[in-house]
Amino acid sequence: MIVLTATPKASSRTKNRLREHGNEFELLRVANASCMHGRQSALVIAPDGWKGWLPLDELQENVTQ
């Protein structure tokens, strides 16, 4: 499980996803996602079932046990 927070310069999309689905996610993979215009992004799943891509350059992470 990872805990993600948005950087100060994160887009409103990223901030909204964290607000809507919480800040704890399971990391599924990291890739240059075409749906994110080739940006290096994390595919994550939230405890509420939401699954999606978040751009790594807009996130800060803390690994939890």
Image (tube, helix red, strand yellow):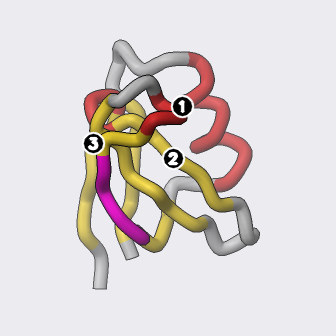
Would you say residue 29 sits in the magenta stretch?
yes
| Residue under the image location 30 percent in, 56 percent down | 30
Q: In this view, does 2 lie to the left or right of 26?
A: left
| Mark 2 nearby-residue class (10 Å; few <14, some 14–19, many ≥20) | many
Label whose residue precedes the other's in the sequence (2 or 1)? 1
Q: What element carries label 1?
A: helix
Which residue is disc 2 drawn over?
A: 53
Distance between the alpha carbons at the discs numbered 2 and 3? 15 Å
Dot 2 or dot 3, earlier in sequence: 2
Task: Calculate the distance from the C-alpha at mark 3 to the C-alpha at mark 1.
Answer: 12 Å
* Picture quadrant where residue 50 is located: bottom right
Percent across and percent down for residue 38 are: 35, 29
Work out whether 45 lies above or below 23: below
Front: mark 2 or 1: 2
The residue tagged with tag 2: helix, strand or loop? strand
The residue wearing badge 1 is 14
